[in-house]
Structure formats: C-alpha cells, structure tokens
Amino acid sequence: MTAPNRKPVNETDIKIPPNRSSRVPLPTRNEIVLLLLLIGTLLLAGRLSPDFLSSRSQLELSTHVWELALLAIPMTLIVLTAGIDLSVGSTMALCAVVFGISIHAGLPPIAAALLSLLVGAGAGALNGIFVAKLKVHPLIVTLATLAAYRGIAEGISLGRPFSGFSDSFTFLGQGSILGLPVPGIVFLIVLAVAAIMIGGTPLGLSLSAIGFNEKAARYSGLAVTRIKLLLYTSSGLAAGMAALLFVARRNTAKADIGTGMELDVITAVVLGGTSIFGGRGRLFGTVLGVLLIHEVREFVSWQWNRDELNLIVVGALLILSVLADSLLSPKKR
Amino acid sequence: MTNRTVETADTPIPSGNRSLSTLLHRLARQREYAVLALLIVTLSVVGAVNPAFLSGGNLRDMLVQDAPIVIAACGLTFVVLLGEIDISIGSLMGLLATALGQLCSPSHAALPVWIAVTLTLLLGTGIGLLNGLMVTLGRMPSIIVTLGMLTVLSGINLLLMNGKWITDLPPGLRWFGVGTMLGIPICLWAALFVVLGAVLLARETPLGRRIYAAGSNPDAARLAGLSVWKLKLFAFTLTGFLTAVATVISVPRLSVIESGVGQGFELLVVTCVVVGGTSISGGRGSIIGSALAALLLGLVRPMLIFLRLGVSASYWERAIQGAFILLAVLADHLARRTRRDARR
C-alpha cells in the first residue's frame, strides 16, 4: 500500500481510452481479423474468378461504395460517443429531393447543391439539438426523424422523380480525375479531415471520453453539448454530400433513395470494431469494415448474381464478428 | 439546475397551487393518458370535419389495420422494458409470411392450414429464442444481434421467394385474415386476447414484476436473486411468437404474399412502444401505452384521407408520424422541466 515506488494514482489507475492508440498505428485484434477476412475474400475471389480482381472491374464496382463509405465516417464518431444516427438514409432522400426541386425551379446546379447541403446540415443539427440540448436518447430522436425526413421528402416531391441534370453535375458522380473516381476523391478528403481532427486534436480523446462516461466528461470540462451538436450536424452534412453523389451517379432524384442505408452504415461501423456502447473504435477499423462489406457483396453478386445471398453473408458476418469479440473478451458483468 | 432525482412511481407530486404543472407532469408521467387524450382529440376533430370518419365501418377498418402492430408491440414492450431492443421483427414477419404461404399453398408444400399455422408460430418462436440466446448467452448488444438478423432474415426470405409471388392461398388460410367470429374480425379477437394477456402478465404476475425490476436496475435485480438473462430470453421469445401471431392474422388479408411484407414494420412497432411511454433504457412503461400509441399512429393515414385534403396529402403521412414522436419527446422534456421548477 505504502510502497515508495508506487506511481501517482492518476497515471496508472485511470483507464486511458484505447483511442490513444490511434497515434500508434498498431492494428487491434478486430482489425487484424478484418484484414485476414478481407485478404481471404480477395484470394478466394481471385481463384474463382480472376477477372474480379482486375483494376478495371474493381474501379467499376467501386461506384457502389462511396456513399456508404462517406456516411460511415461521421457515424463512427457518433457511435464513439455512444450515440447513433438512424436518420442518414432519410436525410439523403430529403437532400436529393431538395436538389431535384431546386434544379427544377431553375436554380443553377451550384446553388442547388449548396442549398441541399445546407438542408442536410440543418437536418443533422435538429437531431443534434434534440440529442445534445434536450438530452433525448439518440435512438428515439433519429427514429423519429428517420420517418419525418423521408416523410418531408415524400411530401414536397409528391413521390415524383427528378432527372435530366446537366453533364457538369453528373461529372461529380460519374467522372474521374487522374484515374480516380470523383466520389472517391470526395471520400478521401472527408476521411483525411476527420482523421486529422481525431488524431491531431484532442477531439478524438474527447469523443471516447464522452462514450465511456458522459457525466465524467462533462464534469472534467469537455464541451459535450457542443461536440455532440457538431457531430450530428456533420452527419447530416455528410448525408447531403452522399445524396449529391448518388443523384449525380444515377442522374435521378427521388424520395425513396437511401432506404435502409442507415443499417448498412451501422453494420460497417460495428463490423469495423467500434463498440455500440461507445468509447472504443477507430476510423481505420471502419474503413476496413466498409471495404470488407463492399468486397464480399460485390463478389457474391459477381459470382452468383444473387443479391439475397449478400444480405445473408453481410448479416452473418456482423453477428459472427461481434459474437467472436464477445466470446474472446473477458467476462464483464 | 437542481439535483437529478430518481424517477420512481412513488416520487411525490407537488400539489396544490401548481395545478397546471401537476397536470402536465401527470400527463407526461402517465403517457397513457396523454396518448389517449391526443387520440380522442384527433378522433373528434376529424369526426367533426367528416362524420364518416367515426362510422362503425371505418373504425373497424382502422382497428383491423392496427391489430398486427398492437400484437407485436405487446411483445416488444417487454423487450424494451428490460433495456433491450429488437429491430428484426419486420424481416421476421416477411420470412414468416413466406413460410406460411409456401407451407400451405397448393403449388408448394400444400400442408393442411392448421399445420402450416402451427409451424409458422413455432418458427417465429424459435427465431425469437435464437435472438434471445445470442443476446444473453452470447453477451452481444441486442441492437447488433437484431440488426444482423434483420439482414439475414430478409436475405433468407428473398431466397425462398425467388422473385415470385405466392398467389394461391387456400381459403382456410384466408379465414385468418378476413374471417369473423360473432361479427368481429379474427384479427381483433387476437389483438384483444394478446393485449389482455400481456397486461395481466405485466401487472398481475410475479414474472411481470420481475421484468420491471430487472429493467429498472439489473444489478439490484441480480443481487436479489433474479436471473435477468432468463427474463430476457423469455421476452425475446415472446416477441418472436407474437410476431408470428401478427403475421398469421394480417398477411392472409390479401390474396397474394410478396417479398415486401413486413418492410419497415419494425420501425412502426418500435415507434409505438416509444410513443406509448416505455423508456428506451428500460424499467418504465406499459402495454396499454404501446397499444394506445399504435391506435394513435394508425389514425394518421385515414385522417389524411378523411380530412379531404386532396391526393397529395397522403404523401405527408410519414412526416406526420415522425412529428408525433418528436412531439411526445418534447412533451416529456417540458414536463420534466416543469417538475424541476416545481421542486425548486
């Protein structure tokens, strides 16, 4: 007890959130498993159908993943704080419809795009106000806005699709710069910004701290309310960006886009090793999760041309990875 | 800011001169009354605009639409009371509908209807049990388990359907959807029985008491000797079974079964449980609240039609449903604040 060489309490006894390790690029156990699964999938795919691994088909198939990847970034940060955002798919629909209507009303594409991003950020901010200021459970808030935002999208568009956008706009979804698809560049920029904010500023640690123990984080002077508001707003903004990419890729905007997207995004985040109870998780894991889901999905579609197999494989992957994690980690009761 | 107080049923209500805040408080504390009040107001306003809204036929149609939601919500309420969640019930319903149709349609397995119905109920119960086992013995978060199951079950459903519809449902099966007993549709009987049973279970049995106890403080319940995991297993299994009941009484209403059955059903049911006043972190809530909320949310679509707002109005259904939830949440917040002020 009174051993003289005992270190000060605050250095050894306080559990430092593992997010600290994001500065040291050591992969976690979960990430190693994901990497192995990813390599296994690619090896199997290369064996069964070598064409799948060619850079041309990979680039072609990558068009399907960018919206999911983009939305997974803010979702990771939100889940880190023990929150959740179920409304991302509906926000996408709302932003897409707002864009379609504004173009239809004669606004130039830039103005329409800005307006739709603004609507996305506003929708996210509303979630944030309910979660951060009114302290309502995020599951309930975003469940409500999941219905409400899609409802507004359906209401203002009356279910009509909008299409026939200019080539300069569809370039955003279909074009490429230096061989890289434009949506991919958008994703990489957003990822870089998020990674710098998480790794290079105290924000990353704050997020884990909020996720571990919100009350303690508040008492130790973190601006919990402001951070949460920022997170949900950025989630809405990302949904707006995803909507623009989607509309540009498909050249059509309708109130039913992004249906079920929230579940895909959460699946990717959780598969990536972020704990749904908050406090534990990294963007690197999420990127791996997105990649694994993407490759498995595309390969199953490529090889067997059955979308329903995909659902089974991805769902089973999610359950098994979390089950393995729970069985491997020591009992905590 | 005053200190946060523990919310128990016995917390004294400040009385006397602060009657308004007391009323607000009571309305929020007992969400059943708030939902009931909103239900009555909506019924009378729409009824005043268009008396046909309150005709026996329309009321019956609305109840018939609500029956499967009410039934599933009874099961889910127990799950949420225990601090867990089940978002797989929509996909489960889709899969069970397909199983039910394929088991008894003459062009598939052509089993007798009663065997098909029994097997469907067993399948639903079994999948509920599986969910429960993964949550309890597997020690996994229920939102992840049921999110995974949502995906897996809808995949299996699509695989079974193979892109085709089931169109040859035997008349014996259709009876569950369109038949009546003593002039009342079968599905209403089923809903009535399920609600009565669930209310009795929650209020009058030791099992119900234990569920509330385990939900409001799992650690204390465990120390008091309750096996919380068995209660959770029971709640998930019950939800699986009741989802099967909801499927059997609602799906045969139409003469075809397609792969879209049950889509979005889970969100509707979760919404009802939440609007009905059940706390998402467990321990607080009631069956009646969930059932009343199902009736309230079920009013939205017919309301938009009967208010004669034109064709475009029906597109706003989901927006209004979402607004209802946000309103319930806001009311909760305001009531909490008025109570805090009243304490000061």
Image: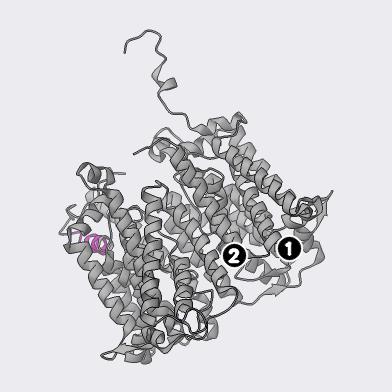
In percent of the image, x 74 and y 49: which residue is there?
A185
Judge whether residue A241 can be spotted in this image. no
Q: Which residues are magenta?
A: B16-27
Residue under mark 2: which chain is it in? Answer: A
In percent of the image, x 46 and y 67: which residue is there?
B90
Q: Earlier in the sequence, mark 2 or mark 1?
A: 1
Instruction: Work out which residue is located at the far top of the displayed protein and give it.
Output: A4
In percent of the image, x 46 and y 72: which residue is there?
B320
Q: Report which residue position mark 2 lands on.
A: A308
Decide which of B44, B220 is in the foreground and name it: B220
In percent of the image, x 55 and y 33: which residue is there?
A202
Secondary-structure class at tag 2: helix
The amino acid sitting under disc 1 is Arg
The amino acid sitting under disc 2 is Glu
Task: Pinpoint residue A284: horizontal percent, then vertical percent.
Answer: 61, 40
- Left or right of A172? Residue B178 is left
Q: Report which residue position mark 1 lands on.
A: A249
Of labels 2 and 1, the one closer to you: 2
Task: Pinpoint residue A184: horizontal percent, then vertical percent.
Answer: 73, 51
